[in-house]
Amino acid sequence: MHRFETEEINEWKNLLIGYRFALNEMNTKLTILNEEFEMIHNYNPIEHIKSRLKNPKSIIRKMNHKGLEMTQENVEANIRDIAGIRITCSFTKDIYAIVDALKQQDDIRILEVKDYIQHPKPNGYRSLHIITEVPVFFSNHKKWMKVEVQIRTVAMDFWASLEHKIYYKFGKEVPEHILQEIKQSADMIAELDRKMESINEEVNILKSQAEKVAQK
């Protein structure tokens, strides 16, 4: 292996290891948060957590698309989703409960919030995206690393997964009538989320009333 290739590989390893540690840090925080909800409120808002790390090819492709020079400083400053976590919840209110909880932690910096639930994308996409920074402690220094957190309901995640597969099959040239059906499906899923949350709230009220009667 050439010296240049060895140095390049080492640079990528040094860059990505920090983001891997940041993912571990955020995953730990979310696990603790979920267990705290379970212990105190007898309810866990998080159904599933999935994390991923962008590979070098994907990062290089994105940097080229932005027309930026490939340096570690440029990558760290301009690519905010190298480390990513996707959280799925049962209900929309859980999404905002998680965001509020993260905002209260003094060792998490919230850099940006994009609310595609209140303001869906034109194709119907709904999710809440947060760009965070968490401290990573190396052997001789501390460094704040970015982690993108996407939070959505199970229904939103189901729609997003199918929409992505459809775009992949058509090479992003999706027929207009299918685009309309995708948007209609997104609206139906949004209504389903609202309906299920309403049912859940009604069940909680009835349960609370039954418990009060039992205590008398």
Image (cartoon, helix red, strand yellow):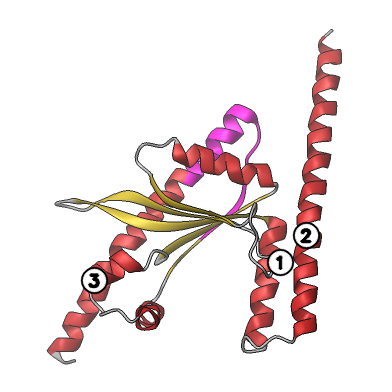
Label 1 environment density (alpha carbons within 10 Å; few <14, some 14–19, many ≥20): some
State if disc 2 and disc 3 touch (CB < 8 Å): no
Residue positioned 35% across, 78% down in the render: 63
Q: Which residue is mark 1?
A: 159
Q: Secondary structure at mark 2?
A: helix
Where residue 19 sits in the image (x, y, percent)?
Answer: 34, 62
Residue positioned 75% across, 64% down in the render: 186
Looking at the rendering, the stretch of residues picked out in magenta corresponds to 30-50
Q: Which residue is mark 2?
A: 189
Three-letter residue code for mark 3: Gln
195 in the magenta segment: no
Where residue 90 sits in the image (x, y, percent)?
Answer: 70, 48
The answer to whether 103 is drawn above or below residue 55 in the figure is: above
Spatial separation of the CA atoms under disc 1 and disc 3: 35 Å
Left or right of residue 76: residue 51:
right
36 in the magenta segment: yes
Three-letter residue code for mark 2: Ile
Q: Secondary structure at mark 1?
A: helix
State if disc 1 and disc 2 touch (CB < 8 Å): yes
Q: Which residue is mark 3?
A: 72
The answer to whether 7 is drawn above or below residue 142 in the figure is: below
Quadrant assignment for the C terminus: top right
Quadrant of the rendered image containing residue 66? bottom left
Spatial separation of the CA atoms under disc 3 and disc 2: 41 Å
Quadrant assignment for the N terminus: bottom left
The residue positioned farthest toward the bottom in the image shown: 2
* Any part of residue 16 in sight: no
Spatial separation of the CA atoms under disc 2 and disc 1: 8 Å
